[in-house]
Amino acid sequence: MSSHGASTAVQYETLTWNMPTEAGYGRHNVRAALRQSGEYRAAIPAEIANLEISLPSRVIADAEEASQEIARFDAELGEEIAPFASVLLRSESAASSKIENLTASARAIAEAETLGQSSRRNASVIVANTQAMQAALALADRIDGDAILAMHAALMNASNPDIAGKWRTEQVWIGGGDFGPRGADYIAPHHSRVPGAIDDLIAFSGRGDIPVLPQIAIAHAQFETIHPFPDGNGRTGRALIQALLRNKRLARQVTVPVSAGLLTDTDSYFEALNAYREGDPAPIVEKLSAASVLAVANGRHLVGDLQVVRQVWASNITARRDSAVHRIADMLIRRPVVNAKLLTRELNIPMSNVYRYLDPLIKAGIIIEFTDQSRNRAWRAPEVLHALDAFALRAGRRG
């Protein structure tokens, strides 16, 4: 083992910030921009490819327990995975967005996803985050730089195509002012360091000699320390957690909504990232372990709520067991807002028959129409949306 892999502590280098000449600042802002000119200290991330991990035994034991919880949850749901895999994926995407203060109701998110157009920007961003999570899982068998760029592209294509799926080519920082890095809470590495730091992170992630959950927590913290993009680092870094859980075979079938677990106390999550940068990885490992246990409990609660909803529906639907009505009901659990186009595409129901199959669901009070256009009609399942909002509420509560 090489000695340079002894700590996760970042070093610093002194760089110079020059006021961009082309910037058209107003008179008031010129002074703020001028104050930024001069030297600043940017992080140099630790090299972790050969990091020797030493954690308190209690932290390792908690991580092991959390890993077993994840594996058990995954195995239990594996039996009846169909509707719940995508429900949990969407719940995780919404929770990850919420850490960035992007919130939207389950209904707004489902409408944005099904109808494509959304007056609420947050809902559209959360739908993009779902696509980033899907990309993360699709690429989990080979985690490399290209996979991370693909996750970021899926996340940012709609809202910021100029930066989507490209490593940054500028200095970035967290906190402080808009005009320069001086006085920021954290100044990320100079952009010239990003590709090398990502290669080092990928090498660390590929190791097979480290307990899995501590490895994932450290990889996540290192990613946030590198901060390889101008925007979307937090959400991409949490998608990376999902890719690694899948890659390491801890969660083979379901998305464990760990962001929902981190949400219960975001302050301590950000404090743990800071501790990591100061050389102590234990807090971020503890945080991910605790978040995983909370996530599994909350995920189980959500699945239980949805199972009850589906059972009640089954007894209220009068159609024959082999009728497409029941297939639509199954689909409503994972897509609680539907229109004719979606049902035709996903379930191969001819457009001309859709309304005939929706009728029994309307009569049973399972779905209600919320559009008054005769052409682009759409329906929602209020009980499913209620269960999803309850999940989000539980996640945001500090336990």
Image: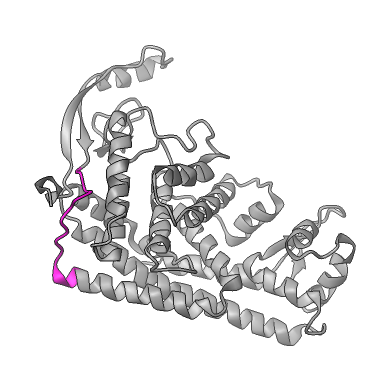
- Relative depth, front residue between 246 and 258: 246
Q: Report the colour scheme.
A: one colour
In the rendered structure, the answer to whether residue 152 lies left or right of residue 66 reads right
Q: Looking at the picture, does residue 145 appear above or below residue 371? A: above
Q: What residue lies at 40% left-to-right and 67% top-to-bottom?
A: 249
Q: Does the magenta stretch include residue 52?
A: yes
- Relative depth, front residue between 208 and 325: 208
**Residue 152, visible in the rendered structure:** yes
Question: Looking at the rendering, which quadrant does residue 82 occupy?
Answer: bottom right
Question: Looking at the rendering, which quadrant does residue 36 occupy?
Answer: top left
Q: Looking at the picture, does residue 222 appear above or below residue 87? A: above
In the rendered structure, the answer to whether residue 349 lies left or right of residue 274 reads right
How far from the left and from the top, in percent, is residue 303?
A: 53, 76
User: In the current view of this chain or complex, which residue is farthest to the top?
Assistant: 21
Q: What residue lies at 48% left-to-right and 50% top-to-bottom?
A: 102
Q: Looking at the picture, does residue 193 appear above or below residue 107? A: above
Quarter of the figure with the C terminus: bottom left
Question: Looking at the rendering, which quadrant does residue 64 occupy?
Answer: bottom left
How far from the left and from the top, in percent, is residue 48?
A: 21, 48
Q: Is residue 209 magenta?
A: no
User: In the current view of this chain or complex, which residue is farthest to the right?
Assistant: 352
Instruction: State the extent of the magenta-drawn residues as a range.
Output: 46-59
Prevalent SS, magenta region: loop
